[in-house]
Amino acid sequence: MRRSVAAGVAASFACLLGASAVADTPSHYERLHDALWSAVNDNFYDPHFHGADWAGARERYRERARAARTDEDFAAVADAMLNEIGTSHLYVVRPAKSPGSRKIGAEFAEIRNELIVTRVAPLSDAYAQGLRVGDRLLSERAALYGEFGSTASPRIQTCDGRRRELKIRREQVFWPPEHPGFRWSQIRTDTQTRIGYLQIDRFDDGAAELADRAMEELGDAQAIIIDVRNNSGGNASALRLASYFGPGAEPAFVLLARPYLQTLGHPVAIDDIRKAPRVNGAYTTEAVFKAMGQHGGGAAFWTDAVERRFTGPVFVLIGPDTGSAAEGFAWYMRERTPARLIGQRTAGALLSSDSFDIGDGWSVTLPVHGNWGADGQDYGDRAVLPHEEIVTTRADLCAGRDRVLEAALRQALEHKSR
């Protein structure tokens, strides 16, 4: 969802800029700065801005914005100002045509102080030029970014030790995400044993229906493995899947927005959480925002009483790329079910966000709802820790080995043999 907040600010500059205004005039970036500040000021969920002096930030950064001459300059000013709040889901997005807005079609992770390729998009020029999972980046990360369609020249070390310099086109990959981001399969290890496997990369609209279909097929399995290691989030549709493993219909989490928190007038307490209006089945982004609007900016989202709960062993695979709604799912599975979590700690990026236009193709994404558990705890940006930590190494990536999944499968089979 994206909303425009720039129109009012833009009007006062229209007569100065005219139709022939160019992108690098100082007033252009000053106007964007004011629209950015206003969007956050009006919509950020916490009325106290996490303790930051947000009112003062407007003037502190305006001079720097006025002095900006390029999109790169302004992006640096915007990032510095937003970083004062110190939260996830808060970032400025450049126009698609903006220089420096694209990178090569691969993802990297820092492993033992080295940047290692963890994923390469199948259709990307990065794949075509020979970049592979396990390759080590020898260049600076900044060298990967540049203009859409331009060429990066990263230096890499391959898994067999060779050093290469590649010429790779900068492209837009990984977003929009692959659809559907919800897949399942099963393995039959003998005539009596089936292990179900769900790989879920997004909890988007439609995920609730896919969860029902998956559990209809996997509900008779002896164990289920749920892989959310590459799940960047989504919406409350994760609750439908969680409903199959929890104790029954119950409040899973509470979302609170600025209007609710301002009316409350005091730090959130357990009694406030218990009084939050109940919401069931809000399994699309539109439904979540509608429920929040209907209830004054505060609502408790409940799991469902499904007909066939799964009572066998469940293993949830998590990692540094597990974020947002996927972390909410992981928290629920850790706190309210017997599931065993395996892998590495999650991203620590659990909030609910919206996107707002600030003009000229720029936008800002910012948190509009905070997340509290039914126990009264503030789960905003809290990482989920695994029960069993397994750190993926470069050697694992180069060998094509998934030790996290191996551990889950081994324990599932051990449980069956008891």
Image: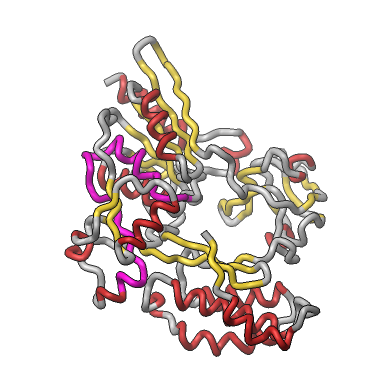
The image shows residue 214, relative to residue 293, as above or below, that is above
Colouring rule applied to residues: secondary structure
Where, by quadrant of the figure, is residue 138 drawn? bottom right
As drawn, the residue found furthest toward the left would be: 271
Indicate whether residue 153 is drawn in magenta: no
Q: Is residue 240 visible?
A: yes
Q: Which residues are magenta?
A: 233-261
- In the foreground, 190 or 102: 102
Quadrant in which the C terminus is drawn: top left
Task: Please report the residue visible at 33 percent of the width from the left and 21 percent of the height from the top.
Answer: 220
Indicate whether residue 249 is drawn in magenta: yes
The image shows residue 30, relative to residue 329, as above or below, that is below
Task: Please report the residue visible at 67 percent of the width from the left and 43 percent of the height from the top.
Answer: 120
Q: Is residue 345 visible?
A: no
Task: Please report the residue visible at 69 percent of the width from the left and 83 percent of the height from the top.
Answer: 14
Task: Please report the residue visible at 36 percent of the width from the left and 64 percent of the height from the top.
Answer: 370
Instruction: Indicate left or right for 155 with 194 as reference.
Output: right
Where, by quadrant of the figure, is residue 66 drawn? bottom right
Instruction: Indicate left or right for 362 with 238 as reference.
Output: right
The image shows residue 103, relative to residue 58, as above or below, that is above
Where, by quadrant of the figure, is residue 265 drawn? bottom left
Instruction: Indicate left or right for 277 with 112 as reference.
Output: left
- In the foreground, 13 or 112: 13
Q: Position of residue 180 (x, y in %)?
A: 54, 37
Q: Position of residue 398 (x, y in %)?
A: 63, 38
Q: Position of residue 338 (x, y in %)?
A: 26, 38
Q: Position of residue 155 (x, y in %)?
A: 77, 53
